[in-house]
Amino acid sequence: MRIGILGGTFNPPHVGHLICAQEAYFQLELDRVTLIPARIPPHKPVEDEPGPAHRLELCRVAVGDGDASSYPVHPEQPELYFSPDLGGYGWCFRKQGHLNVGFGRLDARGLPSATAEFVEFLKARRRIPKKAAWRWRGHAYLIAAPTGRRIVDDGVILIGDAAGLAYPQSGEGIRPAIESGLMAASAIFSAAGRYTRDQLDPYERHLRKRFGVSRLARLLSHVVPDNVAVGLAPRLLEAPWFVRSVLLHRWFLHAHEPGIALAPA
Ligand SMILES: Cc1cc2nc3c(=O)[nH]c(=O)nc-3n(C[C@H](O)[C@H](O)[C@H](O)COP(=O)(O)OP(=O)(O)OC[C@H]3O[C@@H](n4cnc5c(N)ncnc54)[C@H](O)[C@@H]3O)c2cc1C
């Protein structure tokens, strides 16, 4: 184990000390940096000495309980990492003292090994400490597919994940859940107490038009073999125009879509 020791008076410890510790941690590839306040500083007397025990306590407070605020993931810059076959992606983003790490894949069977690989990848690149530990939380859910499930019946109307509406490229489903909820409310209102399948059908048509997988995508899913997609993906991910215009703006930010309207147009 490689341990760095940062000694000092620490009267008081401040952000400069923490930056030094963090830089040493990453640049020297250490496993840990320990702050050790000098009991009797050798170079100069301590001004307004609060006592070594107090300075030690301040160091403990400054370092915290090992939260994520010292990780190199920038809070303003979420990080996304794609599987080489574009069949899944992982993310890593920081909000104050919390680091959110996740991984999703289209094929449930490949998930455990792909997730483990992703964690090793993050550790090797020192995005997360080697000894980081957490409990995964999450669940499987449907994404929009060429042959979606039936979403209305007599007295039944499905929205969001239950209707299988999440965007197939990103797996994001919050916006479709909200929009479909608004559309369903409107359909229920229009049905005016007669909740038969026929009466609720316009909701399904409207939803398919809004979130349905396009005919072109349906066609491509039949004619583009999987191995071609696997071969193409790494090249696409190296092309800045693809990453910016397609992947970020279209697939994740949905910059081409208008804001959510309270009533269907
Ligand atoms: C790990 C992870 C990360 C994700 N990240 C994003 C993201 O960054 N952006 C994004 O857009 N989407 C994301 N998604 C997808 C998104 O969470 C879902 O698509 C979205 O929440 C669907 O909303 P919903 O209302 O249809 O379902 P849910 O949000 O799942 O809500 C259904 C609710 O019904 C409750 N429920 C279930 N059964 C019963 C019952 N019998 N009685 C009463 N209540 C019940 C559940 O507890 C739940 O609260 C993520 C999903 C996962 C798993």
Image (cartoon, rainbow, N blue to C red):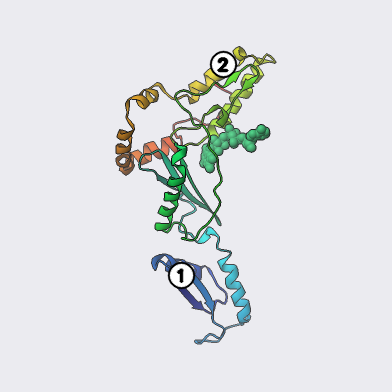
Under mark 2, the amino acid is Pro
- Image point 42% across, 37% down: which residue? 249
Give the distance between the C-alpha atoms of the residues marked 1 and 2, in whole angstroms: 62 Å
Report the front residue among 240 and 207: 207
Vertical placement of 133 versus 3: above or below? above
Whole-percent x and y of residue 233?
A: 33, 39
- Image point 50% across, 36% down: which residue? 172
Q: Quadrant of the N terminus?
A: bottom left
Vertical placement of 79 versus 224: above or below? below
Report the front residue among 16 and 87: 87
Whole-percent x and y of residue 92?
A: 47, 50
Q: Report if the CB atoms under discs 1 and 2 are less than 8 Å apart.
A: no
- Image point 57% across, 83% down: which residue? 39
Label number found at residue 202: 2
Whole-percent x and y of residue 23?
A: 43, 66
Under mark 1, the amino acid is Cys
Residue under numbered circle 1: 20
The answer to whether any part of residue 205 appears in the image is yes
Give ligand 1's quarter of the image.
top right
Mark with earlier residue (1, 2): 1
Q: Secondary structure at mark 2?
A: helix
- Image point 45% across, 35% down: which residue? 255
